[in-house]
Image: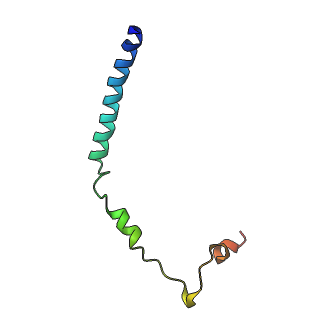
Amino acid sequence: MEASLYILIPISVLLVFVIGALFWWSLRTGQYDDLEGPAHRLLFDDRDEPEDGQEHDVGTDEHLSRKL
């Protein structure tokens, strides 16, 4: 039982330092700068609507049916 603690405690301390380093890196590289931007871009997507009230069928696109 005591022998396993000699292994688990250093591993847990090392894991804390690795997680701390990864968190510090994510803060310094700006990973948390814009948390709301992607949600707003999703809601206000400005893709063009299909003309003539027809639904857009992805399977019949011209560029998909061309032979290479």
**Between residues 67 and 49, which one lies in front from this camera angle?**
49
> Dividing the image into 4 quarters, which one contains the N terminus?
top left
Where residue 16 appears, as percent x and y from the top left, is 32, 29
The furthest residue to the bottom: 52
The furthest residue to the top: 2
Looking at the image, residue 30 lies above or below residue 53: above
Q: In which quarter of the image is residue 52?
A: bottom right
User: Which residue is pictured at 27% across the width and 46% down the height?
Assistant: 27
Q: How many labels does the image show?
A: 0
Looking at the image, residue 14 lies above or below residue 25: above
Looking at the image, residue 22 lies above or below residue 5: below
Q: In which quarter of the image is residue 14?
A: top left
Q: In the image, 57: left or right of 45?
A: right
Q: In the image, 19: left or right of 54?
A: left
User: Which residue is pictured at 38% across the width and 68% down the height?
Assistant: 41
User: Which residue is pictured at 31% across the width and 29% down the height?
Assistant: 17
**Between residues 52 and 22, which one lies in front from this camera angle?**
52
User: Which residue is pictured at 70% across the width and 74% down the height?
Assistant: 65
Where residue 58 appears, as percent x and y from the top left, is 62, 73
**Between residues 2 and 46, which one lies in front from this camera angle?**
2
> Dividing the image into 4 quarters, which one contains the C terminus?
bottom right
Looking at the image, residue 32 lies above or below residue 67: above
**Between residues 47 and 53, which one lies in front from this camera angle?**
53
